[in-house]
Amino acid sequence: MASARVDLDGNPIKAMTICMIGAGGFIGSHLCEKLMAETPHTVLAVDVYNDKIKHLLEPAGSHPWSDRIQFHRLNIKHDSRLEGLIKMADLTINLAAICTPADYNTRPLDTIYSNFIDALPVVKYCSENGKRLIHFSTCEVYGKTIGSFLPKDSPLRQDPEYYVLKEDASPCIFGSIEKQRWSYACAKQLIERLIYAEGAENGMEFSIVRPFNWIGPRMDFIPGIDGPSEGVPRVLACFSNNLLRHEPLKLVDGGQSQRTFVYIKDAIEAVLLMIENPARANGHIFNVGNPNNEVTVRQLAEMMIQVYSKVSGEPSVEVPTVDVSSQEFYGVGYDDSDKRIPDMTIINRQLGWNPKTSLWDLLESTLTYQHRTYAEAVKQAIAKPAAN
Ligand code: NAD
Ligand code: UDP
């Protein structure tokens, strides 16, 4: 398998060792799966949890890839083993972060520490040891669009110049300091600037990924089933939870914000291209999203209701959505990105990547997974208080 694989320039791809920090999370689990199934690379998987990659690790020695993946349970905040693992690897991928909006305004210190301070040693060890780094940032570094500051009826709001987000041209526009929502975006922006500076001043080889709402199976958790009952995950899991419990979906501030959603499996293809084409990927910041899958959050809710009804065979509830204020849902200090359309020029030019999966199709496969994985557990959880 290894000898037949070539990069985008026709050169054979050599097997490499990858130190993947945050490998036990949503994106990490899909990336580990892809690397095990389709490449000869070895993964040193670093995380505090491994539930989402257990199927790749256990039973020990039973998979064709068993000798190519090792799990290292460690917290990068305080563990001296980190530098050794980075030194052993050819490439480090850093996915570790607090990255759930409900935390940004309620746990701003943890958010800033996780996204900036805890990432510092990773960057330092890569730079000092001459190792390549792929760092996961976020589309949220763009903040609000320029268009959002125009009068509501301005025709310029329809002009892509005022809303399409370009890695090398768009400004980063955040709200005031009291709007602690932006603690995450600001920390991510500063670590991006630090990595960029390590590249410019010390020649560190790096790529920065800005994911635009990647969604799919294993994203976050279902409150009260495999996560805290009072926890607030990202929108896919919030709406899945409502659908599984036959509750109305909650639309924050009317669900008017717009997002583009990309299927995790499409997005992982882009990351694999970065991993295996360093000459094309190094020194670049990449938007990774699907500009064709844009909806308002209200439209997303409506589509998820329709798709869930199809895959579960259950009719939708009488009142399918309710409006809720952001203050009530997230608390003080929440703010929102109005619209997120990724410009695709750089990733197209460097890696020839394009997303394939429509929003309907990605919701169909994801909600089939959610129903299969959680419907029975939710039914039992709902039945329990009544039985007591
Ligand atoms: P996730 O929360 O599922 O995964 C993050 C993983 O990092 C978790 O398994 C967590 O346990 C681990 N982690 C956190 N702190 C750690 C520490 N101190 N030591 C060891 N492990 C630690 O999130 P995800 O969706 O997979 O996101 C991965 C990265 O991509 C993050 O940096 C996030 O900011 C970025 N991102 C993702 C999206 C998306 O659409 N999913 C969007 C924007 C940005
Ligand atoms: N949202 C919502 N209802 C929910 C959860 C989220 O209306 O139950 C909204 C949220 O206010 C935001 C969008 O959905 O406008 C996407 O939220 P997500 O948590 O996925 O993260 P974001 O894209 O803002 O980073």
Image (cartoon, rainbow, N blue to C red):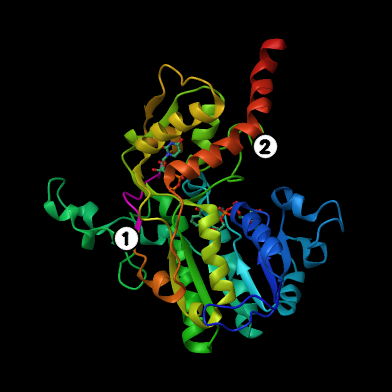
Q: Residue at the far front: name it.
A: 4
> Where is mark 1, residue-wise?
173
Question: Magenta stretch: dominant SS?
Answer: loop
Q: Quick check: 88 above or below 156?
A: below
Where's ligand 1: which quadrant? bottom right
Instruction: Tell me if residue 185 can be seen.
Output: yes
The C terminus is located in which quarter? top right
Q: Amino acid at mark 1?
A: Ile
The N terminus is located in which quarter? bottom right
Q: Residue at the far top: name it.
A: 387
* Mark 2 vs mark 1, CA separation in Å: 35 Å
Where is residue 96? Give x, y as percent. 61, 60
344, 2: nearer the viewer = 2
Q: Counting residues from the N terminus, which is met first, the one under dot 2 or under dot 1?
A: 1
Residue range highlighted in magenta? 332-341
Looking at the image, residue 103 sits to the left or right of residue 36; the answer is: left
Instruction: Tell me if residue 77 can be seen.
Output: no
Looking at the image, residue 343 sits to the left or right of residue 222; the answer is: left
Residue shown at 86% from the left, 55% from the top = 62
Q: Quadrant of residue 257?
A: top left
171, 79: nearer the viewer = 171
Pointer 2 with pointer 1, Cβ within 8 A: no
Q: Quadrant of residue 277?
A: bottom right
